[in-house]
Amino acid sequence: MSFKVAIIGAGSVGFTMTLISDLLKVPEFAAVEFALTDINPHNLDMIRQIIESIVSVNRLPARVTATTDRRAAITGARYIMSCVRVGGLEAFATDISVPLKYGVDQCVGDTICAGGILYGQRNIPVILDFCRDIREVAEPGALFLNYANPMAMNTWAALEHGGVNTVGLCHGVQHGAHQIAQVLGVEDSELDYVCSGINHQTWYIDIRAKGRKVETDELIAGFEKHPVYSKQEKVRIDVLKRFGVYSTESNGHLSEYLPWYRKRPEEIGRWIDMSDWIHGETGGYLRYSTERRNWFETDFPRFKAEAVKPLGEYRRTTEHASYIIEALETGRTYRGHFNVRNNGVIRNLPADAIIESPGFVDRFGINMVEGIELPIACAATCSVSVSVQRMSVAAAMSGDLDMLKLAVLHDPLVGAICTPDEVWQMVDEMVVAQAQWLPQYAGAIEGAKARLARGTVKTRDWQGAARKTVRSVEELREMKGAHH
């Protein structure tokens, strides 16, 4: 069979290589056309070379094209994947540095919290541009597979305002399940589970190890005695003890979605681990991304070497995309966890929420398991974030700066730290710093600048409670390839 797959943001070299290699492991997909597009021609050329090598070495009839013309790449595509970061490292730096001046200490800042909300404001206009192209030039009924954060906001905008069949995909569920299997002493294949909630706040509400139901006390004991996770996952273990269920997200992620663990500088050290950024380091993902901003240059020879190995030696990953497409095209059923509109799937979350929950895929599409009810504490936590996401999408669509400020005000961590006056000034400062990526707020920027000029809220020069290195926005602006 032959059809076209377009990948937007294909310059994410390693991830694109994974997605395409996974697809080529499906025997029926040997003749698929892969259309790669990115705004960075250098990265695009690198990934083109890699994918062409894979196709050539394995003597496949697959076709590979690469273009900076996104619309051309999408034309005639049946499946469109997105893995873009709008604003690149320069914008990301202000997602972290501006809130820090007001005491908001984030580890990642790409889902909710102040950084995630502003990230959504940058992404949503671009997501809607993708959707317009999909509606106009893609194959009728094309499926948009969004891998980009903030997952829920992007998917919400695409479904409600983009008019495109969309599913959001993340690998947090698989990663958390691997941890659970390890602490229980079983293989990943011996673990069954129902994981449900919203993206990055998804909960393992039913766990079976070798068919046996795992109770909360056993899971707590397993994590507390684990020599690594007991040190790295203190927030997740504490939430497990209090809520009775384990969360999908890393210690650093989860700590910034809740109002309890990062609100007092003197307390943050109790909950994080500095062995790796993902366990809670202040601005950890920004530091990691900055230091590895040119990793694709140094790793390009390795990728090229891997590309000339037979696909028979490649082990297909657990990323959902290839399995979804395989199920839709061949009818082989796939069970996974997908980001879709709720519409009653989870009984105690709002109908309009973008949930992440189990579903099955076959020729008839993505079919979600209905009738799930979250534990009450999980539902309460998710519901707060859903409200923030709803306001954030509304702000991004309307360019309503007051609505944006209300969204940030209602964020759990921001609300635990900042006064309303601090939130209003912080958002003004963020939209001014990111104005070039926020076209919907063009009419509000001068007013924000004027308010900042006479600002009365004091800020502080604070680099966070736990940070290894600090890079300024000015340094980032000078970095070649910082714009994506």
Image: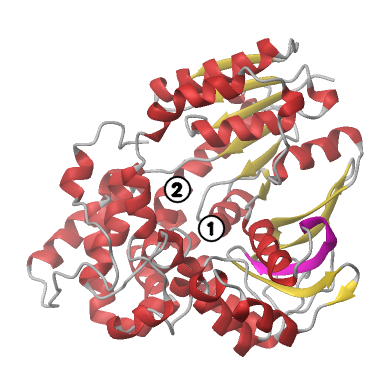
Question: Residue 4 appears at what percent x and percent y?
Answer: 70, 23
Number of numbered callouts drawn: 2
Q: Which residues are magenta?
A: 188-198
Secondary structure under tag 1 reads helix
Q: Quadrant of the C terminus?
A: top left
Instruction: For marks 1 and 2, give the CA distance.
Output: 9 Å
Task: Give the main secondary structure, helix, strand or loop, of the magenta stretch.
Answer: strand
Question: Residue 402 appears at what percent x and percent y?
Answer: 34, 69
Residue 366 is marked as: none
Is residue 189 on the magenta stretch? yes
Residue type at the position of mark 1:
Met
Q: Residue at x 26, y 49 (%)?
A: 435
Is residue 150 on the magenta stretch? no
Question: Residue 282 appears at what percent x and percent y?
Answer: 33, 66
Viewer can see residue 69: no
Residue 153 is marked as: 1
Q: Which residue is mark 2?
A: 123
> In the rendered view, would you say 431 is above or below 213?
above
Residue type at the position of mark 2:
Asn
The part of the image, by quadrant, that contains residue 299 is top left
Secondary structure under tag 2 reads helix
Judging from the image, the colouring scheme is: secondary structure
Q: Residue at x 60, y 81 (%)?
A: 224
| Left or right of 214, for residue 432 | left
